[in-house]
Image: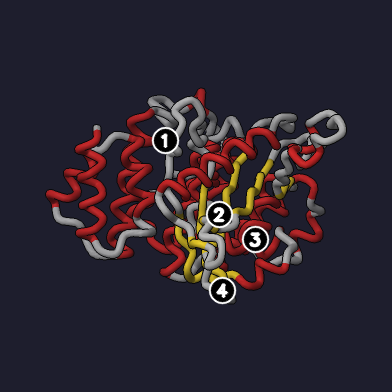
Amino acid sequence: MTSHDKSYKKLFTHPEMIKDLLEGFVDAPFVKELDFSTAEKYNSEFTTDKKLTRRASDIIWKIRNKKNDQWLYIYILLEFQSKPDPSMALRMMSYMSLLYLELYETKQFVKDAETGYPKLPPILPLVLYNGKVRWHKALDVNDLIVESPLGLEPYRPHLRYCLIDEGAYDDGVLAELKNLVAALFRLENGQGEEDIRAVLHTLAQWLASPEQLALQLSFTRWIDEVLFPSCYPDAIPPNINYEQEGSDMLNKMVENWYDGATAEGFTRGKVEGFTRGKVEGKLLGEVNSLILLLKVKFSNPSQEQEDIIFSLKEEQVEQATAYIFQASSLDDMFAYIESLVLKS
């Protein structure tokens, strides 16, 4: 995954973003029945078929229905390609099949009282696309199959996915929503400087509370790694110390952003020793971010525990950061981290 893919994916590892995504952009009655307080990120690599594995950029959540207490799975395929993929319906059918096979093999189903058949939970297949060309490909795999001969019609597969095409939304409509995902779409769609500044200030206000620190951190990193370079490719983003800034980091990023972009001499070629983008520096930032999140959610890790974190590889740091939202305690967190080390 590119830095854009990784930082974008991290935004959707927060339950607040999933709630705003579904409530703001999926117009269906079942959304009102969901108990978002039960939202859990579902971690799986789909090892059932080694020839067809789930993409690293995709995300799966499960949320309980308030009416029947059953789980609903949300498969979010993050599509970062510049143009729509004509095979998307086929790809989504494959991923859905793999997920259902895994749910079946791990017995995550209920048995029908009359037939004894396994009843698997419903899945919402959702494609989140941010390309500049508007989506114009088939939304159902049935549309990719030629007309069936007489008698074959019952065997034609049907699988439709829910498309959210970021660029298709009018900015005025998005601006009226008090919605984190709508704010992200506005920034992604490349508005003018004043519009971007206004959206960033609004985000800083929405995420000002200490309990929103983790989400604020993810937004700040996305701005730092993706939005700023896309708007000012020759400027150096402001130097934000993620571990020390605390709950005001996003606001400070906004305040310093334009100064850093327009100040004379702030270009990559003129700053000697500029090392932004090196793996070492990026990994160090992710390690410090993980330690900060542990401090906020649990308590200060011991020196020995911090040493373990600093010994992790980049992929292990990413896995640990994703797991923190499920961990019940600091001990639980480090049991998971130690399991990552043993696997390597």
What residue sits 24% from the left and 58% below the top? 332
Q: Amino acid at mark 3?
A: Leu
Determine whether 119 is above or below 269 in the image: below
Real-space Cα distance between discs 4 and 3? 19 Å
Residue 331 at least partly seen? yes
Q: Amino acid at mark 4?
A: Asn
Q: Residue furthest front?
A: 114
**Callout 3: few (<14), some (14-19), or many (20+) C-alpha neighbours within 10 Å?**
some
Q: Specify which label sits upstream in the sequence, 2 or 3.
A: 3
- Name the mark nearer the viewer: 2 or 1: 1
Q: Which residue is mark 2?
A: 254
Tag 4, which secondary structure?
loop
Task: Find disc 3 in the rendering and name its residue.
Answer: 22
Measured from the top left, where is residue 48 in percent x and y? 44, 35
Number of numbered markers: 4
Does dot 3 land on a helix, a strand or a loop? helix
As shown in the figure, which amino acid type bears the numbered disc 1?
Thr
Q: Secondary structure at mark 2?
A: helix
Residue pointed to by mark 1: 47
Nearest to N terminus: mark 4 or mark 3: 3
- Between marks 4 and 3 in the image, the one whose residue lies nearer the viewer: 4
Q: Is residue 246 above or below residue 258?
A: below
Looking at the rendered structure, the secondary structure element under dot 1 is loop
Give how far apart the Cα atoms at labels 4 and 2 are.
44 Å
Would you name the residue on which mark 4 appears?
68
Farthest residue toward the left? 304
